[in-house]
Image (cartoon, rainbow, N blue to C red):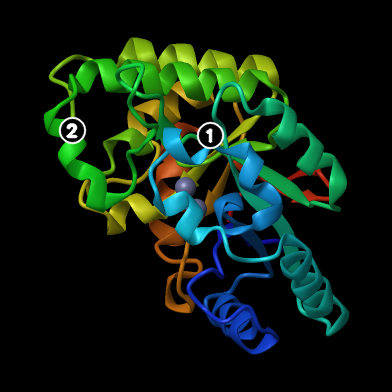
């Protein structure tokens, strides 16, 4: 049996084998057989050029960009040599206009999987900065934006991200809802269009249980969006997006139930960027 969590962040800890081992111990405690680490590139100096320059992006990109990607890759390789069932990826940000640097970094390291996520919306005016909308401390920006426009913009970007062919799966496919701002409109057309784009480019859409732990209080993607993915033939997998050891594998039983309700009977795992389907259990 394979039961994996391919979306886990070490970044709040000290980047040591000891810290990493706590995530693996939790994975084992909740019955997982594999764990995949998926750091945010904005933490690594080598990835800084994937983001807009300082004047065009919120200041915290430069504050956060302090670690070494080489060290992260070595840490996970050391864990693997120590016999731990670990895989390595990144949760890549998709910002249109910065694909070249992303492409280069994808080719430079031995990734097991690549998550494509949209966390940034372009500036609302020419002198503005990119908005990291999933950063809860930037939620006041919602009061300045039209909610439906922001959703439309977000859904265009995830479809565009999928179409690049860079990614194995789309991260938290409707994370635009994270703060709980929702348009009054029916979203089924946006869901169907995104699902069709995912299917066309062969990417999976993860079920990400972190949504249950955020202000919105709903899994990503919303069950009706997941059903649209299923109808379009988009494979899925189940991930926690844990940032602390206790959240590894969290709420996977609930997520399995939602996957079954949507009609899934198998899920994806990844090794060396190759996808294998295993029974959903
Ligand atoms: Zn994310
Ligand atoms: Zn994440």
Front residue of 127 and 71: 127
Mark 2: which secondary structure? helix
Q: CA distance from mark 2 to mark 1?
A: 21 Å
Determine whether 208 is above or below 43 in the image: above
Query: Which image quarter: residue 88?
Result: bottom right
Residue at (27%, 54%) from the top-left corner?
214
**Secondary element type, mark 1:** loop
- Residue at 33%, 34% (x, y): give it: 176
In-image side of 281 versus 63 (left or right) = right
| Pointer 1 local density, CA inside 10 Å: few below 14, some 14–19, many at least 20 | some
Tell me if residue 121 comes above or below residue 268 in the rendering: above
Q: How many marks?
A: 2
Q: Which residue is mark 2?
A: 142
Query: Earlier along the polypeptide chain: callout 2 or callout 1?
Result: 1
Quadrant (top left/top right/bottom left/bottom right) for the N terminus: bottom right
Checking the image for residue 257, the label placed there is none
Q: Which mark is residue 52?
A: 1
Q: Is residue 35 left or right of residue 264?
A: right
- Is residue 264 found left or right of 59 in the rendered image? right
Residue at 82%, 78% (x, y): give it: 78
Q: Is residue 173 left or right of residue 35?
A: left
Q: Quadrant of the C terminus?
A: bottom right
- Rendering coords of residue 154 (x, y %): 39, 24
Q: Alpha-carbon neighbours of circle 2 within 10 Å: few (<14), some, or many (≥20)?
A: few
Locate residue 63, reporting x and y percent: 46, 59
- Image coordinates of residue 279 in percent, x first then y, are 67, 49
């Amino acid at each position: 049996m394979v039961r994996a969590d391919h979306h886990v962040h070490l970044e709040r800890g000290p980047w040591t084998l000891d810290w990493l081992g706590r995530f693996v111990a939790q994975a084992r405690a909740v019955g997982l057989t594999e764990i995949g680490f998926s750091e945010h590139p904005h933490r690594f100096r080598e990835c800084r050029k994937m983001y807009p320059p300082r004047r065009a992006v919120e200041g915290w990109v430069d504050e956060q960009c302090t670690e070494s990607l080489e060290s992260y890759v070595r840490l996970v390789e050391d864990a693997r040599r120590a016999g731990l069932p670990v895989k390595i990826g990144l949760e890549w940000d998709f910002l249109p206009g910065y694909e070249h640097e992303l492409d280069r970094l994808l080719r430079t390291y031995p990734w097991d999987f690549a998550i494509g996520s949209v966390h940034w919306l372009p500036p609302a005016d020419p002198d503005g900065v990119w908005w990291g909308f999933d950063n809860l401390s930037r939620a006041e920006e919602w009061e300045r934006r039209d909610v439906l426009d922001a959703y439309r913009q977000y859904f265009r970007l995830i479809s565009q991200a999928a179409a690049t062919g860079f990614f194995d799966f789309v991260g938290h496919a409707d994370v635009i809802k994270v703060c709980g701002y929702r348009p009054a409109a029916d979203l089924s057309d946006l869901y169907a269009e995104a699902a069709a784009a995912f299917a066309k480019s062969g990417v999976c859409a993860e079920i990400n249980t972190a949504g249950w732990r955020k202000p919105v209080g709903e899994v990503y993607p919303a069950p009706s969006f997941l059903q649209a993915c299923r109808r379009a033939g988009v494979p899925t997998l189940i991930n926690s997006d844990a940032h602390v050891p206790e959240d590894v594998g969290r709420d996977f039983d609930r997520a399995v139930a939602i996957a079954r309700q949507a009609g899934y009977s198998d899920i994806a795992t990844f090794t060396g960027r190759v996808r294998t389907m295993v029974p959903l259990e």
